[in-house]
Amino acid sequence: MSPVYLDWAASAPPEEAAIREAAEVSMRFFGNPSSPHGAGKEAAEILSQARRRFASLIGASPSEIVFTSGGTESNTSLLLSLLDRYRLGGAERRRARIVTTAVEHASIHDQALGLESLGMSCTVVKPGPNGIIDPQAVASALDHDTVLVSVMLVNNETGAIQRVAEISRLVAEFSGRKGRKVLVHTDAVQALGKVPVSVGSLGVDAASFSAHKVGGPRGIGALYLKSGVNPGLLSHGGGQEAGRRPGTENVPGACAFASAVEHRVSKLAESLSSTSLLMGRLISGIKEIRAARIFPESRTGVDWESFSPYILSAGFPPLTGEIVVRVSDENGFCIATGSACSTKKKDRTRVPESMGFDHQTALSALRVSIGPETTAAEIDGFLQMLKEKIPPLLSIFQGRGEPAGPSSRQAGAGP
Amino acid sequence: MSGPRLETDGLFLIKYGEIALKKRNRGTFVKSLKESIRAHLPDVPLAVHETFHRVFVGFRTKDKERIAEALGHTFGVVSFCEAVRVPREMPALEEAAIGLAERFLAEGRGARFKAEVRRADKSFPLTSYEIACRIGDVLSSRFPELIVDVHNPDWILSIEIRERAYLYGPQSPGLYGLPVGSSGKGVLLLSGGIDSPVAGWMMAKRGMALEAVYFHSPPFTSQGAREKVESLTRILRRYAPGTVLHVVNFTPVLARIKEKAKDEEVTLLLRACMMRFATLLAARRGGECLVTGESLGQVASQTVESIHFTGTLSELPVFRPLIGMNKEEIIAVAHKIETFETSNLPYDDCCVLFSPAHPLIHPEVNRMKSAYNCLSVESLLVEALEKSELVSV
């Protein structure tokens, strides 16, 4: 029996039509889009079609789309562009502040802290216990020096949907009062193709996207840059992507990306309703298991305004997430610890700890993420497995559960 | 070695120091050294023989690098180098000396040299001094750039007159110690940490053959942790070639401890069960002692009281070669023997996962003994032993 895949947020199973399109474009339109000859022009035309196709799916115009290698590049290149705009030497860089949150992907969170070490300032807004950022908290963090606000749309670990439209509105009000532009960026990698995404209604100036989270190939993504927003350039090269991202374009990747998103967006309503049902079933099933925790506790399984039905963070403390992932794997289920993207140990507990969970509880976090093809039978099988495997492991951990006796001298040293 | 005589075209000369001092046992020790060299190179044809204070390894040129590598990792070797063997006649000696000098010059070892002669066989017509003078003259006239400098030479040309004459130049240092296998066999409690591989290495250095045991606790410990221990065993095998690894599933024992014991006692009782298990394994595998990586006071289970208690679980001697070492010193050895990087890979062992917030650090031995007896764990340990796996690494 092939394993049940419940790690869609790490990488979605490939969408066959998208991968076929990539193969076909690779074979037929191999020319370099910058070349002036026929083969080049054909490739350029296919690329511009892909750009149009993708742009229309997120309510942008084609000129606002920069194809990148994926979500991480989209995020980091936008942040790094600030280095060019706010040059070293003067007081300018010291006064450039990024406002972001404690629940961002490492390619925003760690990159922002990296810029701080290069002379910029950074304010990290914490979420409430439910993992959701209060837009007012972001507004209060804005100051005269703030140049960029970055808040992710759907959290990759908890599925929390941030109120990005409201944040954009508050930032725009602040900008209006101060008479200087503050850019708003959102990391929409876990939102694209899963919940409705329209850059217009979000009111953002920039947004990041990735193909392989929606069935497209690895190595292609996009950065939306609203018309008129021209962040400084850091990479120099052949002037591709209107000078915004040099390097010979990944034409087959862009086509497959557009194809995968088209497919997902066309079935978005359908898959939202199917995944909502499954996620509700998963949450209530998990809650029946001893020691189960849902991160956040307040998540009900029907609050789809605030949580993506594709992602669940849960745990069985004191079992670490790593143990549950291992047991699941041995029993044919692919799930993840907090975030599959992080191989850095200290980053694993950042998000749950920012929500107020203690370190031990945060270590128990695991992520179950589903997709449009996930079935009820798969969820039931997973729940059945957890119900069988988790309690005996918990019993071992819990032991006889008596507190230590009073007669011995003790200390807090390790074993 | 029986069978047809091996055609060799190269020769390593090996000096062994300490073991030569053990007069009456010299034969046994040299035999172990020879066996140890062969054990390092099971698939390389070698002609190993020994004369007083020297072991010679004849080899085929294509195996030279591998043999040099092995000799550098063989305990009991004080130094080694390639040597030339010629008949005991001055013309042959001179010709060989010229050949070596030519090579040392080509290698840029310098122009100042000295010839050092030992006559193990005093029947040779010239004295050591006369031979040295003669060779010095021959080389100086043949290579005008060479200068005899007996006080501060760049290189020394050594000549030993035995049943035949041996000539050699600068030697590579060995690891000293005693050949593995000459000091019995111990069971090494090998975790994935920094300390236990170093402890094993130190006992191997004193001639102990090792059988390592790793306590695996799936699913609490990962496959990665197990693979790390397998890698560490492979590194130890570079020094102690016969080292094998036993992997035992200790989860049932862990479960029993958690079920019966107070939280504060869990780590100590787990250590105690490991000691008991290792003792049972030693009985089965001909081990004469246990080896652990404990260092006094490093953690709660390594205080004098804790060590006293865990030691009561074995009637065998328990060697703790790191007991008086600081962590920095242990790490320095781990770097030297190349286990550090592997040990430092981030996989939790079960001791970390199950360590209580407040472990006992000064346990009362009698109380702990009765806590151990309450576990009634002996049959579980025997069962674990039956199911333990001998891993080829």
Image: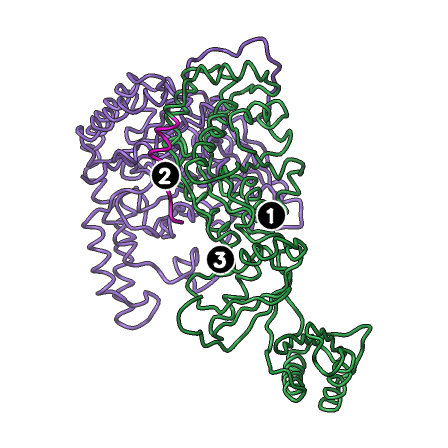
Callout 2, which amino acid? Ala
What residue sits 50% from the left and 11% below the top? A403
Residue A188 bears which disc, if any? 2
What secondary structure is marked by label 3?
Answer: loop
Chain ID at mark 3 = A
Chain B hue? green
Of residues A253 and A362, the one nearer the viewer is A362
Disc 1 packing (10 Å; few <14; some 14–19; many ≥20): some
* The C terminus of chain A, quarter of image: top right
Left or right: where A332 falls relative to B323: left
- Neighbourhood count class around disc 2 (C-alpha, 10 Å): few under 14, some 14–19, many 20 upward: many
Provide the secondary structure element on which disc 2 rests.
loop
Same chain for the residues under marks 3 and 1 in the image:
no
Q: Quadrant of residue B217?
A: top left
Q: What is the chain identity of the residue bearing mark 1? A: B
Q: In the rendered image, which quarter is residue A25 located in?
A: bottom left
State which mark lies toward you, 1 or 2.
1
> With respect to residue B379, does A80 lie above or below?
below
| Figure colour of chain A | purple
